[in-house]
Image (cartoon, rainbow, N blue to C red):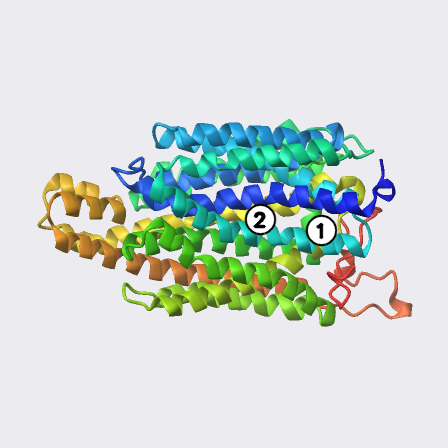
């Protein structure tokens, strides 16, 4: 079946089903962020340490990031509907496992399995969308589909807060199961089993190198936060090994005749620079979300439902920002809209350096609204522009390149952001531990959550106040670093989308360097170029 044989009504129903699948992934991400404080609690949760919470988040994103290009190849070979349905089943089964995990280690393993399910869902989701819609309707469908992110961001924290106020923490994972059932029904009844005419190898070597390399790198970065030292062998050795394995992965993919993850895509200035900018943005979003959860529920003492409601402005901003950004891009250009939006997002993240224990909630809410709006205006239009450059016959694997870069940014963001917070917190809390008994001192060094717990059980209220102050200081330092990294992403995007003058007729054929019209995935591929002009995002 081809797109021309699908009636418009069925296309719209397929889009609705795909949005439910996408909503599932975003819903799970935001639900977990609201649950982190509870999981760290020794009584109500799993007594998880900061490193274990980083891995509970990072193991999911790690599997998601490194398996997407393999999932894209599976979809091209066996059909994207088949792989998408398999991903939903894996995701539901892993959600049940996570809900009944007996300790942090089991939760981390279950979250990794959920990441495998998401990796199977995402490329097939985007590939089916690209096969279903053509021409200008495809950009419209992408823009509409992107609103599922905002809906997930809005519904997830509030839903998690309600569940945590009435049930045990595992209920936040069980909520995924009915959503999966609804999505599977829609897939079976509505979605054709599109597949690529080009059968590509599954690339087990690339998959192994990317998973092991990124896992080793993340382990070394997270371990740094645990021991607060860079010179130890168990810190620098995994980082070095991870970088070597990732370099080997790139080399293997470059030498492959039909790579599942094609690094050549990233050598094109506009496509590569746009992906780097998105990766840095997701780095920042993951890190600042990690801080935000502990700031509201830990330092400020909000309940889960109160924290969920307080995060609604971010979701509202993201929902409004994506279509607003697309509309402005059609009027002006991607560069004029996305670069200022990304810059503004960086400044709002840096503004966390101004938050304290008594900062008025209204001020925080306004900042979160602006943050969500700016992220949506950058993320939506840039993603749509990049996807529109992909050849249809490589829809699954091609979209996986963009998603892999973004999820890799999330993995590193969680690792680096959490490590900065842990190191700075340990240094800040140390002066308050001199007169504290030994066992209490060791537990207090782990995290602010542990410090508050032992302060309560040991009747040391001053220690609890010191934990709040140390956490606020660590958040301030981390926010500045996150802002600088996001500003660097804005600079990369500015350069990537800088218009290049076309050569004079007499100069055609000379070596004039890359232009923005070179953003096609491979020579001869049927991809549309990523141009910086007014047509980007309006096709």
Residue drawn 78% across and 43% down?
10
Left or right position of 80 against 308:
right
The spot of residue 442 in percent (x, y) is: 19, 41
The answer to whether 276 is drawn above or below residue 342 in the figure is: above
Mark 1, secondary structure of its residue: helix
- Which comes before the other along the chain, label 1 or label 2? 1
The spot of residue 269 in percent (x, y) is: 69, 57
The spot of residue 507 in percent (x, y) is: 87, 67
Q: Assess disc 1: are there few (<14), some (14-19) or many (≥20) residues with their C-alpha within 10 Å of its C-alpha.
A: many
Residue drawn 38% across and 58% down?
478
Labelled disc at residue 406: 2
One can see residue 11 in this view: yes
One can see residue 273 in this view: no
The answer to whether 89 is drawn above or below residue 353 in the figure is: above
Residue marked by disc 1? 387
Q: Assess disc 2: are there few (<14), some (14-19) or many (≥20) residues with their C-alpha within 10 Å of its C-alpha.
A: many
Mark 2, secondary structure of its residue: helix
The answer to whether 325 is drawn above or below residue 95 in the figure is: below
Inter-mark Cα distance, 1 to 2:
13 Å
């Amino acid at each position: 079946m081809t797109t021309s044989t699908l009636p418009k009504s069925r296309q719209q129903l397929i889009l609705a089903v795909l949005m439910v699948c996408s909503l599932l992934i975003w819903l799970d991400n935001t639900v977990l962020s609201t649950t982190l404080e509870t999981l760290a609690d020794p009584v109500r949760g799993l007594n998880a340490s900061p490193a274990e919470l980083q891995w509970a988040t990072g193991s999911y994103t790690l599997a998601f990031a490194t398996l997407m290009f393999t999932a894209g190849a599976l979809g091209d070979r066996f059909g994207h509907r088949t792989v998408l349905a398999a991903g939903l089943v894996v995701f539901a089964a892993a959600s049940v496992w996570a809900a009944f995990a007996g300790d942090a280690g089991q939760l981390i393993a279950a979250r990794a399995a959920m990441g495998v399910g998401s990796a199977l869902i995402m490329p097939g989701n985007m590939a089916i969308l690209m096969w279903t819609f053509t021409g200008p309707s495809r950009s419209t469908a992408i823009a509409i589909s992107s609103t599922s992110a905002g809906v997930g961001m809005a519904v997830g924290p509030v839903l998690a807060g309600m569940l945590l106020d009435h049930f045990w923490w595992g209920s936040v994972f069980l909520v995924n199961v009915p959503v999966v059932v609804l999505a599977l029904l829609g897939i079976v009844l509505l979605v054709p089993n599109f597949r690529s005419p080009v059968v590509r190898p599954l690339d087990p070597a690339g998959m192994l190198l990317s998973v092991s390399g990124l896992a080793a790198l993340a382990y070394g970065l997270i371990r740094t936060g645990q021991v607060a030292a860079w010179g130890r062998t168990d810190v620098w050795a995994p980082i070095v090994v991870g970088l070597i394995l990732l370099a080997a992965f790139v080399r293997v993919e470059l030498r492959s005749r039909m790579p599942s993850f094609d690094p050549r895509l990233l050598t094109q200035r506009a496509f590569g620079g746009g992906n780097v900018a998105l990766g840095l943005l997701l780095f920042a979003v993951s890190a600042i979300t990690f801080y935000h959860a502990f700031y509201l529920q830990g330092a400020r003492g909000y309940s889960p439902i109160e924290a969920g409601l307080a995060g609604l402005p971010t979701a509202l901003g993201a929902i409004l920002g994506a279509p607003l950004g697309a509309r402005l891009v059609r009027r002006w250009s991607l560069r004029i809209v996305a670069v200022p939006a990304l810059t503004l997002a960086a400044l709002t993240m840096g503004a966390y350096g101004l938050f304290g224990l008594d900062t008025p909630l209204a001020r925080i809410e306004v900042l979160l609204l602006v943050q969500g709006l700016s992220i949506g205006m950058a993320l939506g239009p840039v993603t749509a522009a990049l996807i529109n450059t992909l050849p249809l016959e490589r829809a699954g694997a091609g979209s996986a390149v963009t998603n892999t870069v973004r999820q890799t940014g999330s993995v590193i963001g969680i690792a680096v952001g959490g490590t900065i917070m842990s190191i700075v917190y340990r240094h800040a809390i140390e002066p308050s531990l001199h007169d504290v008994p030994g066992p209490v001192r060791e537990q207090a060094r782990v995290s602010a959550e542990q410090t508050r717990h032992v302060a309560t059980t040991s009747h040391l209220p001053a220690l609890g106040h010191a934990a709040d102050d140390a956490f606020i200081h660590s958040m301030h330092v981390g926010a500045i670093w996150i802002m600088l990294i996001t500003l660097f992403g804005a600079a990369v995007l500015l350069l990537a989308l800088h218009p290049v003058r076309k050569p004079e007729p007499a100069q055609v054929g000379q070596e004039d360097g890359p232009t923005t019209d070179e953003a096609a995935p491979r020579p001869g591929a049927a991809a549309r170029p990523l141009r910086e002009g007014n047509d980007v995002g309006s096709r």
